[in-house]
Image: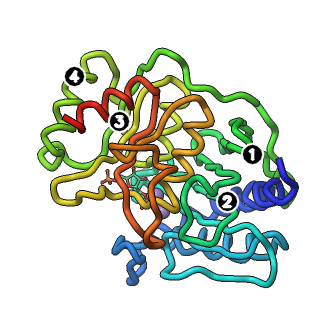
Amino acid sequence: MSEAVERVLDVVTETAPEIRAGLSGRREYETAENPSGDQMLAADVHADELLEERLLSVDAVAEYASEEREGTVESEGGHLHVACDPLDGSSNLKSNNVMGTIVAIYDEPLPAPGEALVGAAYVLYGPITNMVAAVDGAVTESVVHSEDGGAERHVVDEDVTLPADPVVYGFGGRVPDWPADFEAFVREIEQDLKLRYGGAMIGDVSQVLEYGGIFAYPALQSAPNGKLRLQFEGNPIGYIVECAGGRSSNGEESLLAVEPTELHQRVPVHVGNTGLIERLEGALAE
Ligand code: AHG
Ligand code: MN
Ligand code: MN
């Protein structure tokens, strides 16, 4: 792993306990919407401000972008372009369910293709705060320990790999809004899998990485590009799952191959065991 990528992951590690500590007391919605038109919680804004300040202070970071802000913020020098989802699943805050922070580290200016990723990670604010990071094709899970004002991550699994036999599935959107070919795929695979859908992609992807299976926020009849954003959610999660031996897809091809057109573009996201993704692509191609 390059020192620069390591430094970015260290900064996210150090910031995670502060994001988590800042959640209570920030459960109310801001008046402003984010560029995707989503309502923002005070917790989204707090996490975004912390990450912007900390990540732009890293010499190697040339650019910071997040789903909460229109444009990118540039700094002198640097060669890494960082795109964050400061708080993924923030609608889970009021119901006190899991959420996460996603960081995508590209070596090209934003918006960049997933193939330009040199690292990606998520922090999951669950019973334990952990970080799952993919760098150089390998996925590592660490537990984040905050100690007297600082924070460290201790590796608990240095080779996170999708189990061969899928167990869980979780799909976003409303069933009547699913296109018929996607629904037919669901009706087929749900015979063999258990439903695990928690409303925060990071929590649902963590289930897939642990137990094997598939997560998707698919194309909807009302939203053909789905809900999730390529730069901040699709690319980093697709990279992590592919590095863990699985596959990602926009319905036709790997998310990492999707041409970036604009910073906040949405993309249908499907990630999980290779066999399930191939069955999905076959079902959508019919
Ligand atoms: P964010 O909070 O960053 O906007 O992400 C929420 C996303 C994703 O985490 C989750 O998979 C999806 O929204 C859930 O959408 P629904 O509430 O429509 O199920
Ligand atoms: Mn999100
Ligand atoms: Mn978010």
Q: Amino acid at mark 2?
A: Ile
Measured in 3D between alpha carbons, the distance from the residue under mark 2 to the one under mark 1, in whole angstroms, is 20 Å
The residue where tag 2 is placed is 105
Q: Amino acid at mark 1?
A: Val
Residue 15 position (above or below residue 118): below
- Residue 266 position, x and y percent, is 37, 62
* Quadrant of res 94: bottom left
Residue 108 in the figure: left or right of residue 236: right
Q: Nearer the viewer, residue 258 or 32?
A: 258
Q: Earlier in the sequence, mark 1 or mark 3?
A: 1
Residue 275 position (above or below residue 222): above
Q: Earlier in the sequence, mark 3 or mark 2?
A: 2
The residue where tag 1 is placed is 144
Measured in 3D between alpha carbons, the distance from the residue under mark 2 to the one under mark 4, in whole angstroms, is 36 Å
Give the color scheme: rainbow, by chain, secondary structure or one colour: rainbow
Q: Nearer the viewer, residue 48 or 125?
A: 48
- Residue 106 position, x and y percent, is 66, 61
Residue 182 position (above or below residue 99): above
Q: Secondary structure at mark 1?
A: strand
The residue where tag 4 is placed is 188
Q: Earlier in the sequence, mark 4 or mark 1?
A: 1
At x 44%, y 73%, the residue is: 262
- The nearer-to-camera label among 3 and 4 is 4
| Crowding at mark 3 (Cα within 10 Å: few <14, some 14-19, many 20+) | many
- The nearer-to-camera label among 4 and 1 is 4
Q: Earlier in the sequence, mark 2 or mark 4?
A: 2
Q: Secondary structure at mark 3?
A: strand
- The nearer-to-camera label among 2 and 1 is 2
Q: Amino acid at mark 3?
A: Gly
Q: Secondary structure at mark 2?
A: strand
Find residue 170 and name its label: 3
Residue 218 in the figure: left or right of residue 220: right
